[in-house]
Image (cartoon, rainbow, N blue to C red):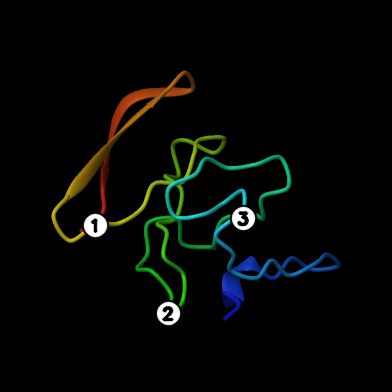
Amino acid sequence: MICPHLQIPGGPVFPLSPFSPFGPAGPRGPMSPLPPTNPVGPLLPGCPWSPRSPVCPAGPIFPLTPKKKETILTIPLCYRVLLNTR
């Protein structure tokens, strides 16, 4: 299944793959697509990863889990910023 928000105008569409640079547990790769319009919105069907935080435009993608209510981003551009994943 292909996530609708991964369709880049004039560019390729990235299908889901365990080897994708933007996989559920992996960091963003240099070829990663742009985030969805609503960075803190809910997950779309078939998209097993959470959107990026709006305050960390260059940050990695964190997976959403039912046990974790919030994720602490620990990257240089956005150190220890709390992202509420609801």
Q: Amino acid at mark 1?
A: Thr
Q: Earlier in the sequence, mark 2 or mark 3?
A: 3
Position in image of residue 26 (x %, y %): 49, 44
Q: Residue at x 47, y 18 (%)?
A: 76
State which quadrant residue 71 falls in.
top left
Q: Residue at x 71, y 40 (%)?
A: 30
In the figure, 2 relative to 55: above or below?
Answer: below
- Looking at marks 3 and 1 on the same chain, the residue that comes earlier in the sequence is marked by 3
Taking the spot 59% from the left edge, 77% from the top edge, the residue there is: 4
Q: Element under label 3?
A: loop
Q: Which residue is mark 3?
A: 20
Determine which residue is flagged by label 1.
Answer: 65
Q: Residue 22 at what x, y percent from top left?
A: 57, 51
Label 1 crowd bin: few (<14), some (14–19), many (20+), radius 10 Å: some
Residue 45 lies, in percent from the top left, at: 42, 79
Secondary structure under tag 1 reads loop
Which residue in the rendered view is the most extreme toward the right? 10
Q: CA distance from mark 2 to mark 3?
A: 17 Å
Quarter of the image holding residue 12? bottom right
Residue 26 in the image: above or below residue 12: above
The span from disc 3 to disc 1 (Cα, nearest Å) is: 19 Å
Which quadrant of the figure has residue 28? top right
Other-residue count near label 2 (Cα within 10 Å), few / some / many at <14 / 14–19 / ≥20:
few
> Circle 2 — which element?
loop
x and y percentages locating residue 70 in the rendered image: 20, 45
Q: Which mark is residue 45?
A: 2
Query: How crowded is the residue under tag 3: few (<14 C-alpha within 10 Å), some, or many (20+)?
Result: some
Mark nearest the camera among 3 and 1 is 3
Between marks 2 and 3 in the image, the one whose residue lies nearer the viewer: 3
